[in-house]
C-alpha cells in the first residue's frame, strides 16, 4: 500500500490530536518537510523515518507550541539541527525574524537553504550557542530550546537574552527546576502531542 502524501498525513494527524491548523500554514509546513526529506537523503538531519511519527514530532509539536505564542516576534532557537522546532514555530507565528544557532556546518547549510526556500527572514549562526548568545546585537522576544540540555547555566544565559516581556519555550517531558537567581519563573505548561507525551514549558521574567 502506498504511503499517503505528507499533506494528507499532516491533516489526519492534526485532526487526531484535536489541532486546528490555519489553512495558509499547511502548505508551508509541507514545503519544509519536503525540503527536509530531500536533504535527509544526503545527510543525517533526522532519524525519524516513519511519516506519522515525523509529522507529529517535527511539525505538529512545534505548531501546537506556537499557537500559544504572539505573532510577529523575533525568535531565537538553540541547537537547531534539522530546523524543528524553530522553522515550524516561525511559520506558525509569522515570526518577524528567526535566528537559528547550529554548530555543525552541514546542518547550518541546510538551515540557510530552508530560510531562503521558505521565505523566512532570518539568519543562521554556525557556532556553539554559548558563544553566540552573549554576542547577540538585540534581545529576543521568544527563545526556543529542544536539543540543548537545560541546566542553571543555560537558563541564566538565555534569560539575559530575553526582552522584559519575552518568553522562553522549553520542549521537555518534565518542568525543570528554575532557581530564583536565573530571574525566570514558569509561566505555564501546555500539553502538546499526547502520543509523544510532550509538553512545552513557557518561562518568563520574574
Image (cartoon, rainbow, N blue to C red):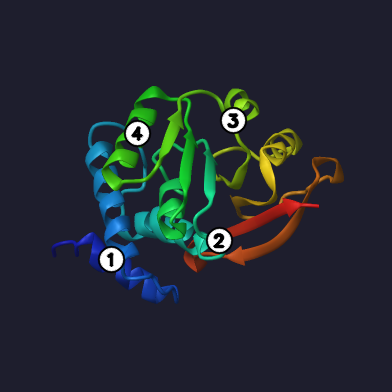
Q: CA distance from mark 1 to mark 4?
A: 26 Å
Does dot 3 land on a helix, a strand or a loop?
loop
Of tags 4 and 2, the one toward the viewer is 2
Q: Quadrant of the N terminus?
A: bottom left
Residue shown at 80%/41% (left/top)?
182
Determine whether label 2 and label 1 are within 8 Å by CB: no
- Give the mark, 3 or 1, whose residue is nearer the N terminus: 1
Packing grade of label 4 (10 A; few <14, some 14-19, many >=20) is some
Find residue 200 and report its image quarter.
Answer: bottom right
Q: Is residue 82 left or right of residue 2?
A: right
Q: Above or below — where is 89 with respect to 153?
A: below
**Chain-order first, disc 4 or disc 2:** 2
Estimate the x, y position of residue 77 in percent, counting from the top left.
52, 41
C-alpha separation, residue under disc 4 versus residue under disc 2: 24 Å
Label 3 Cα neighbours within 10 Å, binned few <14 / some 14-19 / many ≥20: few
Q: Residue at x 83, y 45 (%)?
A: 179
Using residue 49 as the reference point, say whether residue 66 is left or right of it. Answer: right
Distance between the alpha carbons at the discs numbered 2 and 1: 27 Å
What residue does disc 1 label?
9
Q: Quadrant of residue 83?
A: top left
Residue 91 x %, y %: 40, 55
**Mark positioned earlier in the residue sequence (2 or 1):** 1
Q: Residue at x 61, y 55 (%)?
A: 173
Q: Which residue is mark 3?
A: 137
Pointer 1 or 4: first along the chain:
1
Q: Is residue 152 visible?
A: yes
Given this view, does label 1 or label 4 mark the residue nearer the observer?
A: 4
Mark 1 surroundings: few (<14), some (14-19) or many (≥20) residues within 10 A = some
Query: In terms of depth relative to the viewer, which is nearer, 71 or 159?
Result: 71
Which is closer to the viewer, label 3 or label 1? 3
Q: Position of residue 136 (x, y in %)?
A: 59, 30
Residue named by callout 2: 70
Amino acid at each position: 500500500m502506498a504511503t499517503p502524501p505528507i499533506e494528507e498525513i499532516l491533516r489526519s494527524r492534526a485532526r487526531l490530536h484535536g489541532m486546528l491548523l490555519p489553512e495558509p500554514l499547511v502548505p508551508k509546513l509541507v514545503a519544509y518537510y519536503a525540503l527536509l526529506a530531500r536533504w535527509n537523503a544526503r545527510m543525517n538531519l533526522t532519524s525519524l523515518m516513519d511519516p506519522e511519527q515525523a509529522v507529529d514530532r517535527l511539525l505538529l509539536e512545534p505548531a501546537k507550541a506556537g499557537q500559544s505564542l504572539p505573532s510577529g516576534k523575533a525568535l531565537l532557537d538553540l541547537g537547531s539541527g534539522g530546523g524543528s522546532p524553530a522553522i515550524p514555530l516561525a511559520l506558525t507565528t509569522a515570526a518577524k525574524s528567526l535566528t537559528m544557532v547550529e554548530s555543525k556546518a552541514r546542518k547550518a547549510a541546510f538551515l540557510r537553504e530552508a530560510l531562503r526556500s521558505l521565505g523566512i527572514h532570518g539568519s543562521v549562526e554556525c557556532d556553539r550557542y554559548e558563544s553566540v548568545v552573549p554576542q547577540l546585537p538585540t534581545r529576543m522576544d521568544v527563545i526556543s530550546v529542544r536539543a540543548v540540555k537545560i541546566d542553571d547555566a543555560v537558563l541564566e544565559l538565555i534569560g539575559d537574552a530575553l526582552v522584559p516581556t519575552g518568553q522562553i519555550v522549553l520542549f521537555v517531558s518534565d518542568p525543570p527546576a528554575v532557581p530564583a537567581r536565573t530571574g525566570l519563573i514558569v509561566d505555564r505548561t501546555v500539553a502538546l502531542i499526547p502520543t509523544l507525551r510532550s509538553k512545552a514549558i513557557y518561562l518568563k521574567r520574574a
